[in-house]
Amino acid sequence: RQISRTTTLVVEELRHQEVVQIEAAGVASFVVGSRGQVWAFGSNRSMELGGRKEVAQIASAQRMKSVRDVHVVQVSSANSTSGQSHTLVLGANGEVHSFGASNCGALGQGPDVKQSAPLLLRFSAQVPVKMVATGARHSLLLTDTGRLFAMGDNTHGQLGMESRVAGSFVDTPRSVEGPLGDEEVQVKLIAAGDSFTMAVTEEDQLFTWGANANGQLGLGKLQDQLVPQPVPQLSGLRIGAIACGACHALARDPHSEPFFACMRDPHHPCFGW
């Protein structure tokens, strides 16, 4: 039967479950429970749900059997709807499993893996990870020691690697360069837009890099940036949360009311409200 768009329904499969995270990706949704369980539903055409390739979609929330042995603490999945969708699952032990499809290395599994069910990212078995983020075609890994690694498409410099020519890609995790490549600098927050990246250091300094045609980096200019750049207008603020849309960004100072937004505005590329 047809259901009105304004109708709110209970997801029966998740009734009485203690939910700690909801991830709404481009064509799929994930729900993480307090005991490390994950439910998924939506499209699986690129294996972004971690299901069998012959299963095109899942219409109701189902427990992910492919990561049943992992105590999951975070899921991040690409907002892309282009058919190249990838997902990262972070376990309580710091290990990351990647799955879905990416022809530009966002799975981090090397040149031969472009589509896969959940696979352990070998890098994370040696270097524990505490946070993950996914853009449309790139991925980020924040380690327990505050180091930031990236993989995937670098067309707009979103990996933060000046040594990589724009237009290339990286298919295994590599350290972000520039100011955040310094081992003395520790990162505490990360976020990814379609083709740009944000990070906040333990010293509460906000850095942005990658695509900037819409002013989403908040730098007062519209050129793409190949390595992390400090956002001077927010210098001195304690940034407690960051988030990225496809082509805009948000940052929040927990001690003040306004959010700060970065988006296309020729006169004020970064402003608060």
Image: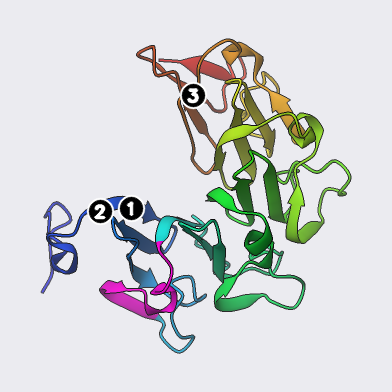
Kindly identify the residue that appears in the image at 74 percent across and 29 percent down.
Answer: 184
Residue 135 in view, yes or no: no
Tell me the amino acid under the disc marked 3. Answer: Ala
Kindly identify the residue that appears in the image at 41 percent across and 82 percent down.
Answer: 56
Kindly check if marks 1 and 2 are in contact, taking CB atoms under 8 A apart as contact: yes
Tell me which colouring the rendered structure shows.
Answer: rainbow
Q: Where residue 237 appears, x then y in whole percent?
A: 53, 13
Closer to the camera in the image, 212 or 242 = 242
Tell me the amino acid under the disc marked 2. Answer: Val
Kind of element beneath mark 2 = strand
Residue 80 magenta-highlighted? no
Q: Quadrant of residue 43?
A: bottom left
User: Mark 1 and mark 2: span between their CA atoms?
Assistant: 8 Å
Residue 248 against residue 136 in the figure, above or below: above
Q: Which of the labelled discs sits on residue 22, or is there none?
A: 1
1 vs 2, front mark: 2
Give the labeled residue for mark 2: 19
Quadrant of the frame with the N terminus: bottom left
**Mark with earlier residue (3, 2):** 2
Q: Magenta span covers which residues? A: 57-71
Give the labeled residue for mark 3: 261
